[in-house]
Amino acid sequence: MRVFRSIQGYKNWRNEISTSSKLGFVPTMGFLHEGHLSLVRNSVQENNYTVVSIFVNPVQFNNREDLEKYPRNETRDIAMLEEAGCDIIFMPSIEEMYPEEITESYSFPALDDVMEGVFRPGHFNGVAVVVARLFKIILPNISYFGKKDYQQYMIIKELARQQFPDLIIKGMETIREKDGLAMSSRNVRLSVVERENADMIFQLMTRAKKLKEEFSPAEIEKHIANMLVNAGFAKVEYIQISDADTLEPVHQWKDSSKPRIFIAAWLGNVRLIDNMELI
């Protein structure tokens, strides 16, 4: 396994491999967990080479404190990736990725103006900026994304459709802890008591599947919000049942054949997001 910290170093290696080689790419912000590693293993199985980037992207954080607190452990990440079979790690500095003022601006109508787009203004433009730059550097054939960040996954698919039509974007199912909590690098910031309560999101999403037989989407959203507050969640930003393809809110079950529930809520000082299909 090789580690590149410069764009030119990576490009030199990329130019050396056969043009017929299939290259898989997993972009990450580091502090890896089993969710990331499952993407890496899928890439290793399906491609000749697997590249993983580790870059904490400052332009997608609209909360400076969240950026500063984002967990990092480079040595641990490198060891985990080597064990998972990764071939190349691309680990650039901020100066390497953003040597000049950022001028790119992206728009994904209907996809980026709901849910996360409402509560994290500018977030998805920051994601698109870094992912587009990474795609241009890495030149992958397939790129892998987890569906825990489902809205982001949909936006990356649209970005690829617009600018990288030959690139395959592959979404992989959310990897969860034994109690159902979606794996996330931020989970380490939960206190012991908060961690015990964190699985409530998964429990309530699972319950929503059964409740949909008797209640409307709005009634379920309200019920889950009340349950989370009663369970000790500090703030519920949104609970939305939307169509999985358009992300448009579902007001009646007949409006969508692929309804999906999305949740963002604060437990202590940690913001948790999750989603689940309701079919």
Image (cartoon, helix red, strand yellow):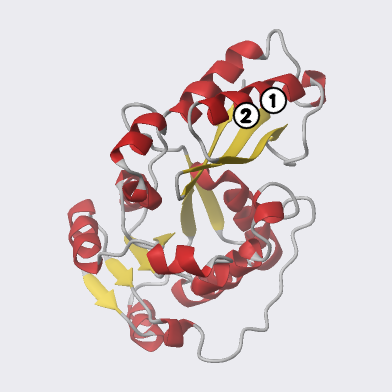
Residue sitting at x 34%, y 62%: 30
Above/below status of 155 relative to 273: below
Residue of label 1: 222
Looking at the picture, which amino acid does disc 1 mark?
A: Lys
Residue of label 2: 225
Looking at the picture, which amino acid does disc 2 mark?
A: Ala
Above/below status of 103 relative to 110: below
* SS assignment at label 1: helix
In depth, the one of 170 and 33 nearer the eye is 33
Residue sitting at x 25%, y 68%: 74
Local crowd size for mark 2, using a 10 Å CA cut-off: few (<14), some (14–19), many (≥20): many
In depth, the one of 75 and 264 nearer the eye is 264
Residue 213 image offset from top left, x and y in percent: 68, 9
Question: Do the numbered discs 2 and 1 sit on residues whose CB atoms are within 8 Å?
Answer: yes
* SS assignment at label 2: helix
Relative to 202, is 219 on the left or the right? right
Residue 63 image offset from top left, x and y in percent: 55, 65
Residue 170 image offset from top left, x and y in percent: 51, 48
Residue 188 image offset from top left, x and y in percent: 32, 49
Marks 2 and 1 sit apart, C-alpha to C-alpha, by 5 Å
Above/below status of 50 relative to 19: above
The answer, for residue 10, to whether it is visible in the render is yes
